[in-house]
Image (tube, helix red, strand yellow):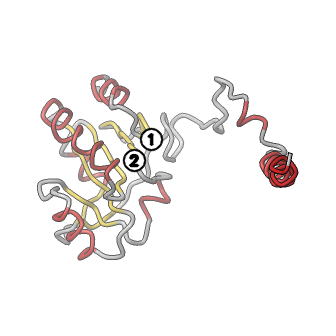
């Protein structure tokens, strides 16, 4: 009985704190299968599928400028992968390196480093993580991050016409592969 009297107030407080923060978020508790993203007009400029990707200029870790227009002129499509150089990103990029790059030689794969503060820091992170052969764009001002709503593991596919075909978190690579296989 002594323990019940001592523990009861703490248990009640725990229950109170765990339930008061849930007001108005019942949609998180009961998910639906409906897509609640805002609709986009096909062919408009933006970062969502069916939109035309905005052109960009970014510098790589060797201080070379890259534009989306130039990249698309060289390939059937472009894949942008946003990395934080964490173990999860490393596993995604390892799959891209070993499975997708060899299977899709006519697609440009660009890694976007949006977490380091300079080209020099991006280059150091690139080399330290074993990605010397990748083209890594240094996004220290987060322009690409903001343009494509990028973040850890976000993968964007842009086809040769400049249309975004995919913009989502990298899951297991199946949707990425299917989207690449469907490129014109």
First in residue order: circle 2 vs circle 1: 2
Q: Say which mark, if any, is on residue 9.
A: none
The residue drawn where x is 64% and y is 35% is 39
Provide residue 106's location: percent of width, then percent of height.
16, 36
Where is 91 relative to 130, above or below?
above
Provide residue 83's location: percent of width, then percent of height.
34, 55
Q: Say which mark, if any, is on residue 169.
A: 1
Q: Are marks 2 and 1 in contact (CB under 8 Å)?
A: yes
Provide residue 14's location: percent of width, then percent of height.
79, 51
What secondary structure is marked by label 2?
Answer: loop
The residue drawn where x is 21% and y is 69% is 123
The residue drawn where x is 31% and y is 51% is 87
Q: Say which mark, if any, is on residue 153.
A: 2
Please rate how many residues cluster around mark 1, counting C-alpha atoms within 10 Å: few if below 14, some from 14 to 19, many from 20: some
Image quadrant where residue 124 sits = bottom left
| The one of 115 and 6 positioned closer to us in this rendering | 6
Answer with left or right where residue 15 lies relative to residue 183: right
């Amino acid at each position: 009985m002594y323990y019940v009297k001592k523990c009861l107030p703490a248990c009640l407080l725990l229950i109170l704190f765990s339930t008061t923060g849930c007001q108005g978020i019942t949609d998180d508790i009961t998910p639906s299968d409906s897509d609640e993203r805002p609709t986009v007009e096909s062919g408009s400029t933006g970062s969502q599928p069916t939109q035309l990707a905005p052109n960009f200029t970014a510098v790589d870790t060797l201080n070379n400028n890259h534009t989306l227009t130039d990249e698309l002129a060289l390939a059937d499509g472009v894949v942008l992968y946003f990395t934080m150089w964490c173990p999860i990103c490393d596993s995604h990029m390892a799959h891209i390196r070993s499975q997708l790059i060899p299977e899709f030689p006519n697609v440009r794969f660009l890694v976007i480093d949006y977490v380091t503060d300079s080209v020099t820091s991006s280059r150091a992170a690139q080399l330290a993580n074993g990605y010397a052969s990748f083209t890594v764009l240094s996004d220290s001002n987060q322009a690409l991050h903001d343009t494509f709503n990028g973040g850890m593991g976000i993968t964007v596919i842009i086809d040769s016409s400049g249309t975004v075909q995919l913009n989502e978190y990298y899951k297991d690579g199946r949707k990425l592969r299917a989207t690449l296989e469907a490129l014109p």
